């Protein structure tokens, strides 16, 4: 009989190596390879005997009639928006975020609402299993949030076998929260909780239970220092929905972003505000990220970003500081891609004749918001030109458009939604690509074909 071959699994990315090294060859992390028992290696793969064992699998056509999955709305509109309408029965959802960002608070609020019958009056069976806190600690937090009377069933456990044995008695819960998956331990394999093999095995057992019993499963996941969910990458493939809870602990605002959703759209967001009584919904996120000012301020531009189907107006701020000759200028960016800032600066210098080589450049997105929309290029360029020339952008104007390396300003998607949101908040003008200047809108549209034309307009040439 062949002996099991030793293997070393990276605890950061899950890659497998047959010998130990100090640095993982795939993710370049140090001291993350841990020895695990490997499978038995045989010289030849045995073929399946198709005459015995196995069963036929039913094949159906794409045109077969199917019913839409049942959803459980939590009554927390921002959470339901990110989920696509609520939790789906028999689904698995993974939510990750930095420590202290509010993951447990949000899920405890959702669990309490569902158990209490919100929003449709039908009380659900809800189980909340914590592997990081004692049941009394969870109960104290619930009282602080005003949820002490909610009929949520609490447990403090880390054994996957014990959890599933308990939940298999009687009716299965409608919602099961596991906080967190990195603390769970399966006795089917060897390894400490949090290792790649344990996270994968524990998640697989819990997901199988959820699929068989129709329970909506929510797994809380830890994140690494770069913001990705800790553990094997296959964990994100195993679940149906992946949510990322973002925000700075120094800011009160939190953003729940859908990264993957098999039952709804991706890139939807929910916006919350951290208060003393817990997380509260923010119905109008645009008002949070705008500075209320009556007169123009140099280096500030309003950009109508788009997150899924939701337009959000944010303020982009820029500051330039001239340095003495010979000094190395600094580039600092908060809330935007630093590589894209370098590209915009290069286009402004090469195509528009502006000089930023002797100036420090600081760029910030107000309110702790992070912009990933390429339509922000024109708003960033407007802020940079305004800061360099000390000419303010009109306070009643918004700007959006993508900038090419040739200096062309290209159109972007969903211009009507962006303009409509800007009009709702009292803006009267929009600086847009020429191709979008004919959009039907209550705003006055100024179209620009190239960035040079836009800069001439900003500088009054």
Image: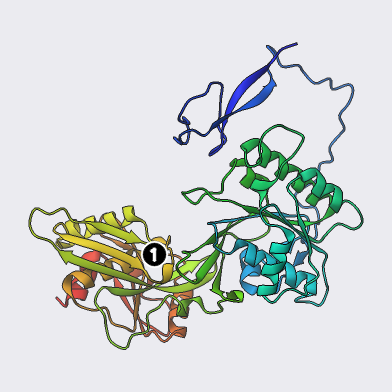
Residue 235: image x %, image y %?
A: 64, 44
- Pick out the residue farthest to the bottom: 294
Q: Quadrant of residue 377?
A: bottom left
Q: Nearer the viewer, residue 438 or 26?
A: 26
Q: Which x, y percent locates residue 431? A: 32, 75
Labels in figure, total: 1
How does the figure colour the protein chain or chains? Answer: rainbow
Give the camera-side residue of 5 and 320: 5
Position of 410 compared to 232: left or right? left
In this picture, is 72 found above or below 226?
below
Farthest residue toward the left? 325
User: Dot 1: what SS?
Assistant: helix
Whether residue 109 is visible: no
> What residue do we see at 75% from left, 11% from top?
1
Q: Quadrant of residue 38?
A: top right
Please give the name of the residue rendered at 42% of the width and 85% of the height, measured from the top-left corner: 442
Image quadrant occupied by the C terminus: bottom left
* Front position in the image: 320 or 258: 320
For mark 1, does the 10 Å Cα neighbourhood hold few (<14), some (14 to 19), or many (20 or more) residues? many
Residue 127 coordinates in the image, percent (x, y): 78, 60
Furthest residue in direction right, as rendered: 170
Residue at 53% across / 71% down in the picture?
310
The reply to whether residue 203 is in sight is yes
Query: What residue is shown with label 1?
Result: 375
């Amino acid at each position: 009989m062949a002996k099991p071959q030793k293997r070393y699994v990276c605890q950061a990315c899950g890659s497998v190596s047959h010998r130990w090294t100090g640095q993982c060859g795939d993710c370049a992390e140090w001291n993350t390879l841990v020895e695990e028992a490997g499978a038995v290696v045989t010289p030849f793969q045995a073929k399946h005997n198709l005459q015995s064992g196995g069963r036929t699998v039913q094949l159906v056509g794409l045109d077969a009639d199917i019913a839409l999955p049942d959803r459980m709305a939590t009554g927390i509109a921002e959470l339901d928006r990110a989920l696509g309408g609520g939790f789906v029965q028999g689904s698995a959802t993974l939510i990750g975020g930095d420590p202290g960002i509010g993951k447990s608070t949000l899920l405890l609020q959702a669990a309490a609402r569902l158990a209490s019958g919100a929003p449709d009056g039908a009380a659900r069976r809800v189980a909340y299993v914590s592997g990081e806190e004692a049941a009394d600690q969870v109960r104290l937090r619930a009282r602080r949030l005003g949820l002490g009377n909610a009929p949520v069933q609490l447990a403090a456990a880390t054994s996957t076998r014990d959890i599933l044995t308990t939940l298999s008695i009687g009716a299965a819960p409608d919602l099961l929260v596991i906080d967190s998956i990195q603390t769970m331990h399966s006795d089917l394999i060897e390894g400490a909780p949090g290792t790649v093999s344990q996270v994968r095995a524990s998640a697989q057992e819990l997901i199988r239970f959820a699929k068989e019993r129709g329970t909506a499963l929510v797994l809380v996941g830890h994140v690494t220092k770069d913001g990705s969910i800790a553990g094997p990458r296959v964990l994100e493939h195993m679940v149906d929905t992946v949510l990322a809870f973002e925000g700075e602990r120094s800011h009160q605002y939190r953003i729940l972003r859908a990264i993957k959703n098999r039952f709804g759209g991706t890139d939807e967001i929910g916006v919350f505000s951290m208060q003393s009584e817990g997380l509260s919904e923010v119905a109008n996120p645009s008002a949070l990220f705008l500075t209320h000012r009556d007169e123009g301020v140099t280096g500030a531009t309003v950009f109508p970003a788009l997150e899924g189907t939701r337009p959000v107006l944010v303020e982009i701020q820029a500051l330039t500081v001239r340095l003495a000759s010979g000094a190395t200028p600094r580039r600092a960016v908060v809330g935007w891609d630093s590589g894209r800032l370098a590209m915009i600066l290069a286009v402004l210098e090469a195509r528009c004749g502006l000089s930023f080589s002797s100036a420090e450049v600081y760029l910030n997105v107000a309110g702790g918001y992070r912009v990933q929309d390429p339509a922000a290029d024109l708003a960033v360029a407007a802020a940079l030109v305004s800061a360099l020339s000390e000419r303010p952008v009109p306070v009643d104007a918004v700007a959006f458009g993508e900038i090419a390396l040739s200096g062309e300003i290209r159109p972007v998607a969903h211009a009507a939604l962006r303009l409509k949101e800007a009009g709702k908040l009292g803006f009267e003008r929009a600086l847009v690509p020429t191709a979008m200047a004919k959009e039907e809108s209550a705003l006055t549209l100024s179209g620009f074909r190239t960035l040079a034309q836009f800069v001439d307009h900003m500088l009054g040439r």
